[in-house]
Amino acid sequence: RKLGWGRRFLRETLIVYLGVIAVSQALKENKSLPAMVREHKQPKFVEATIVYFRIFQGWGMFAPNPITEDGVLAIDAITLDGRHIDPFTGKAPDLDLTDARGAGLNQIWQDYENRIRFDRNKVFRQGLTEYLRRWHEETGRPEDELVAFDVYWVRDQCPKPRTLKAYKNEVIAILTWRKPGFRPPAGFPTEIPPEPKVESAGN
């Protein structure tokens, strides 16, 4: 009987705990609330629980606070033979989102790109770095080896009512890498630019 009581107590305690932190997260992510309510500090173990169980509460698609921002991950990478390429698209990097007519992403890629930009997911960018560093192994072309890359979160504001043109394009570097010891040989068709300043693209 004591063991059964203990199980029930732990079960109900867990339910109450998850309910409390879900309410806390809803207050934190509800844009219509005053800043003093939204900016309350959560303990690290609460933040860890929210991230691990994916119980974010940012229901921003409903009026009166619909999401007005579009964004996409763009990579400006330089190959061993001097080409600028975005390994995610196989094309030249596009850092202007205002003329885009859809990136053609499925739900998995869309969620990945949107979430890897957040500061809370910085730890997962190491995996992105490793993937890009061995991208030439994926393509099977030695000349595709990357000697430098900069990963950007490119965002703009959706068109205003009764307009069709997005505006306020912003380019934010979230990850950068240069191949150690690489020196462009004579005749290298492009210049290795200095590393951009890495900034926050969201919490």
Image: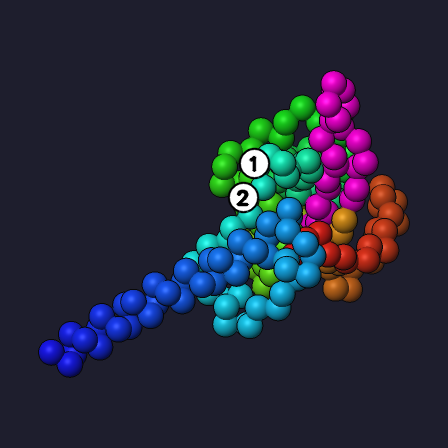
The amino acid beneath tag 2 is: Trp
Residue toward you, 199 or 81: 199
User: Is 160 situated left or right of 110 in this image?
Assistant: right
Q: How crowded is mark 1: few (under 14 residues within 10 Å), some or many (20 or more)?
A: few
Answer left or right for 109 relative to 18.
right
Quadrant of res 5: bottom left
In this rendering, position of residue 137 left or right of residue 176: left
Looking at the image, can residue 78 be seen?
A: no
x 79%, y 37%: residue? 169
Q: Residue 109 has which mark?
A: none
Q: Name the residue under label 2.
A: 59
Query: Per the image, is 67 magenta?
Result: no
> Percent position (x, y) of residue 38?
63, 58
Looking at the figure, which quarter contains the C terminus? Answer: bottom right
> Crowdedness of circle 2 by 10 Å Cα count: few (<14), some, many (20+)?
some
Residue 31 % position (x, y): 64, 48
Assign the N terminus to one quadrant of the image. bottom left
Image coords of residue 186 (percent x, y): 88, 49
Residue 52 horizontal side relative to residue 172, left or right:
left
| Disc 1, SS | loop
Kindly tell me whether residue 187 is visible in this rendering: yes
Q: Main secondary structure of the magenta part?
A: strand
Work out whether 89 lies above or below 44: above
Q: Mark 1 points at which residue?
A: 62
Circles 1 and 2, Cβ within 8 Å, touching? The answer is yes
Q: Give the range drawn in magenta.
A: 146-171
Q: Where is residue 118 in the image (x, y as percent from the top left)?
A: 63, 54
Amino acid residing under circle 1: Phe
**The one of 19 and 194 positioned closer to us in this rendering:** 19
